[in-house]
């Protein structure tokens, strides 16, 4: 919601007026002088929407304010161009409405356009978040990062490394929305206060690493490369088993953590719907983007969302730090998922992250069944893994 600053208004006053933490207002209005707003400055109020009301007979500002648990001055602030003394039945005024429900639409086949729509909607109503474009996929789609919070502790999460695991993007976006709702409404998630996390943790989320692949699975190939992609898929137009990027390279086999072992033993020796690690590490733009992000940001913790198996992997060649075992125990307790220290696998993002930075890294295998998991599992996955999402931020 946007308001126009009046003479004498400050962000501190707006914080009290709308009962929004000052830090969120400051982060939503980074270009403003926090102590001396100029008359007419456009100020973003996070966690609110502007609602049009039609006055009924007997309506008065104090009655409307009382019924909505808001102050009269908040109504005056939003209706500066209205002559309040001349309002009558049927006239329109604007009232602030606190957002109490999720804005993202995730319980559907969640393709790249769905992600873009939800990112835009969240940024509009929670302008204290940052949306960064990290680079472009093979087909030129932007790979987005959502950045939330402050602090020296940096936690990274990602989803949809694999195309037919697109439900992980929907789950992550749902958690993002929950987090934003909680900090703007003084709420908790799993009995954990969220505002202190915002103040102390720098959260990085890349909800869809492989947008081209996700769109291929859900919408089929673009016309201009249809022939090539169908050929990689063995002549089939059924892409439900496709995990790779649009080039037929498995992005989670692209990282320089004993990559040669995977290259030698993986059956596909050329582009394929899954498992082909490429001709060398980091040949694909999406993998390059994720490696660059980790090198630049030096995250303290990384969680990669995959499907399926109701388990997670937390070790790699004994490179993991000692704290990983404790975190894994807590993750398992909170989710019921099986904690697996080591698996016979290399070249994954988690593997490389642990090897490169010696920090805790985790690969979560959400749900159980055959990929792509059906949307009927969404609610169960959401409930099972919510504790891991929150614990990854406060442990």
Image: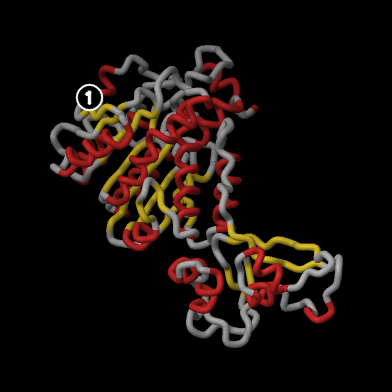
Given residues 275 and 95, the one toward you in this image is 95
Q: Residues within 10 Å of mark 1 (few under 14, many from 20)?
A: few
The residue located at (71%, 70%) in the rendering is 63
Count of picture labels: 1
Q: Position of residue 225 (x, y in %)?
A: 59, 27
The residue wearing badge 1 is 343
Relative to 330, does residue 165 appear above or below in the rendering? above
The residue located at (17%, 38%) in the rendering is 325
Q: Position of residue 391 (x, y in %)?
A: 31, 45
Q: Quadrant of residue 91?
A: bottom right
Q: Position of residue 279 (x, y in %)?
A: 34, 27
Quadrant holding the N terminus? bottom right
| Visible residue check, residue 307 | yes
Q: Is residue 277 left or right of residue 341?
A: right
Given residues 140 and 36, the one toward you in this image is 36
Colouring scheme, one of rainbow, by chain, secondary structure, one colour: secondary structure
The residue located at (80%, 63%) in the rendering is 54
Q: Quadrant of residue 89?
A: bottom right
Relative to 6, does residue 294 appear above or below in the rendering? above
Outermost residue toward the bottom? 8
| Visible residue check, residue 245 | no
Q: Is residue 242 left or right of residue 60?
A: left
Under tag 1, what secondary structure?
Answer: loop
The residue located at (55%, 69%) in the rendering is 18
Q: Is residue 322 left or right of residue 294?
A: left
Q: Is residue 90 left or right of residue 313?
A: right
Q: Position of residue 19 (x, y in %)?
A: 51, 68
Given residues 5 and 152, the one toward you in this image is 5
Relative to 55, does residue 83 appear above or below in the rendering? below
Outermost residue toward the top? 235
């Amino acid at each position: 919601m946007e308001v126009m600053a009046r003479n004498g208004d400050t962000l501190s006053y707006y914080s009290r007026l709308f009962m929004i933490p000052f830090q969120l207002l400051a982060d939503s209005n980074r270009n403003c002088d926090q102590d001396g707003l100029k008359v007419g400055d456009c100020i973003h109020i996070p966690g609110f929407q502007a609602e049009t009301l039609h006055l009924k007979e007997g309506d008065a500002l104090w009655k409307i304010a009382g019924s909505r648990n808001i102050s009269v001055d908040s109504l005056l602030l939003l209706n500066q161009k209205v002559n309040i003394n001349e309002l009558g039945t049927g006239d329109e005024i604007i009232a602030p409405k606190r957002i109490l429900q999720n804005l993202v639409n995730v319980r559907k086949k969640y393709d790249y356009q769905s992600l873009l729509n939800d990112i835009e909607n969240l940024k509009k109503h929670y302008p204290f978040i940052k949306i960064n474009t990290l680079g472009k996929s093979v087909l030129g789609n932007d790979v987005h990062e959502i950045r939330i919070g402050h602090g020296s502790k940096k936690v990274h999460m990602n989803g949809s490394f694999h195309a037919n695991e697109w439900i992980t993007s929907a789950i992550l976006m749902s958690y993002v929305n929950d987090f934003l709702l909680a900090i703007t409404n003084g709420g908790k998630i799993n009995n954990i206060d969220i505002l202190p996390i915002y103040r102390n943790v720098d959260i990085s989320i890349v909800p869809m690493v492989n947008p081209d692949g996700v769109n291929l699975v859900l919408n089929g190939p673009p016309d201009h490369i249809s022939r090539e992609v169908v050929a990689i898929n063995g002549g089939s137009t059924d892409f439900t088993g496709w995990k790779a990027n649009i080039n037929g390279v498995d992005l989670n086999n692209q990282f320089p953590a004993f990559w040669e072992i995977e290259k030698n033993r993986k059956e596909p020796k050329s582009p394929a719907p899954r498992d082909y690690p490429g001709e060398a590490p980091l040949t694909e733009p999406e993998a390059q983007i994720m490696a660059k992000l980790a090198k630049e940001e030096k995250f303290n913790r990384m969680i990669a969302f995959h499907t399926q198996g109701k388990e997670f992997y937390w070790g790699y060649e004994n490179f993991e730090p000692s704290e990983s075992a404790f975190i894994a125990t807590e993750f398992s307790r909170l989710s019921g998922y099986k904690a697996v220290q080591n698996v016979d696998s290399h070249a994954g993002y988690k593997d490389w992250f642990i090897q490169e930075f010696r920090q805790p890294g985790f690969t979560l295998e959400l749900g159980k069944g055959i990929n792509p998991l059906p949307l009927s599992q969404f609610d169960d996955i959401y409930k099972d893994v919510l504790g891991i999402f929150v614990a990854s931020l406060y442990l």
